[in-house]
Amino acid sequence: MKKITTLRQAAITSVAHYLPEEVLPNSFFSSYLDTSDEWIKTRTGINTRRILRKGGSSDLALPAVKRLLEKRGITANDIDIIIFCTVTPDMFFPSTACVLQDKIGAKNAWGFDLSGACSGFLFGLETGRRFIEAGGAEKVLVIGADKMSSIIDYNDRNTCPLFGDGGGAVLLEPIEESEYGILDSILHIDGSGGEHLHMKAGGSLNPTTHETVDKKWHYVYQEGKTVFKSAVVGMADVSAEIVEKNHLTSDDIAYLVPHQANLRIIDATRERMGIPPEKVMINIDKYGNTTAATIPICLSEWHEAGKIAKGDYLVLASFGAGYTWGSILIRWAY
Ligand code: COA
């Protein structure tokens, strides 16, 4: 007999985040590098970032996930799938999803790591959404967590002030009301951009040797200006496109939730969408670029502050290494 499947709607039903306590101000960098608080502030929008000294990305996710479960009133055993989005896994294998599964004791879960750099969380959200819609899971944990300080050269002024450490997580569940939840997505990759933003060694192409360490190939390499130009166009285009595609206008959007890489990229996206500054979630000033974690941290902070209401339309948007970029349209469900 032919199997009939009805697609279900997936929605975020809980969100939480974690930031390590140690604060690194811009003055830290100007104390030993040829840079200044003024340069970093005006060119990036960043004032401070958080740093995790001990532990890996799983330790950035753990407090966020515990809080998320508590908020939703469920236990780790209720989780079906863990999708851990990161470019700074605790180690290559086992996956950080496995590490976290053990730490929280999610006995009934399976899961995997997802490498989408700054767009990792959006790619994870889309993946989790599809498992829910197809009936393959009831509760999917999507985590964005990166310990960027582990792959940053603190003597390279071009990259070291930009990044910070942090973690965020959302729970996806099926919901009855089909007008709420994750409504649409536009996602892209373009590998030809890889040469401009990458980490050269540590993988199978350039395994770790004394030479790769000496050449500093285990750090983030970025041609900032080139990436900036692509990011401005990429993020602004997909954000405007998803609004138009869904027959909405900028007035309908409660918040733009942009990846936090550079305040000037965020401003360009906002202007292209024609929405006022108060409708943009911005915390890059406090945390810098936490890669896969920026968007869930924003969602969590704004939700905890009571600034997101049921029925709000949110446009999530990102651009990052790969290149990877995209937008997701959500109608907040709780
Ligand atoms: N302090 C002082 N000067 C700095 C500096 C720092 N921390 N970092 C770079 N500079 C210098 C550069 O060396 C350059 O000097 P030069 O003209 O003598 O060569 C000058 O400032 C201008 O550099 P430029 O690259 O034009 O600056 P910018 O305005 O593009 O800003 C970035 C640099 C990295 C902040 C910006 O390009 C950026 O945000 N890029 C995109 C990041 C991104 O979106 N990444 C994707 C997600 S990870």
Image (spheres, grey):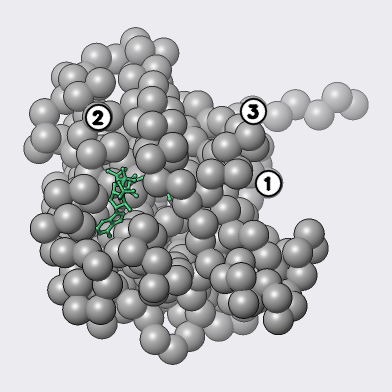
| Residue 34 in the figure: left or right of residue 170 | left
- x, y percent for residue 23: 22, 77
Is ligand 1 less than 8 Å from the beta carbon at label 1?
no
| Residue 189 in the figure: left or right of residue 202 | left
C-alpha distance separating marks 2 and 1: 39 Å
Give the foreground label among 3 and 1: 1
- x, y percent for residue 331: 33, 33
Q: Amino acid at mark 1?
A: Gly
Q: Which residue is mark 2?
A: 268
C-alpha distance separating marks 3 and 1: 12 Å
Q: In terms of secondary structure, where does tag 3 sit?
A: loop
In percent of the image, x 16 and y 64: which residue is there? 36
Q: Which residue is mark 3?
A: 6
Q: In terms of secondary structure, where does tag 2 sit?
A: helix
Q: Amino acid at mark 3?
A: Thr
Q: Which residue is mark 1?
A: 136
Residue 174: numbered disc = none
Q: Mark 2 vs mark 3: which is more N-terminal?
A: 3
Say if residue 212 shows up in the picture.
Answer: yes
C-alpha distance separating marks 2 and 3: 40 Å
Give the foreground label among 2 and 1: 2
In percent of the image, x 71 and y 81: which residue is there? 210
Q: Residues within 10 Å of mark 3 (few under 14, many from 20)?
A: few
Q: Between 272 and 239, which is closer to the camera in this rendering?
A: 272
53 relative to 301, above or below? below
115 relative to 275, above or below? below
In percent of the image, x 63 and y 77: which residue is there? 213
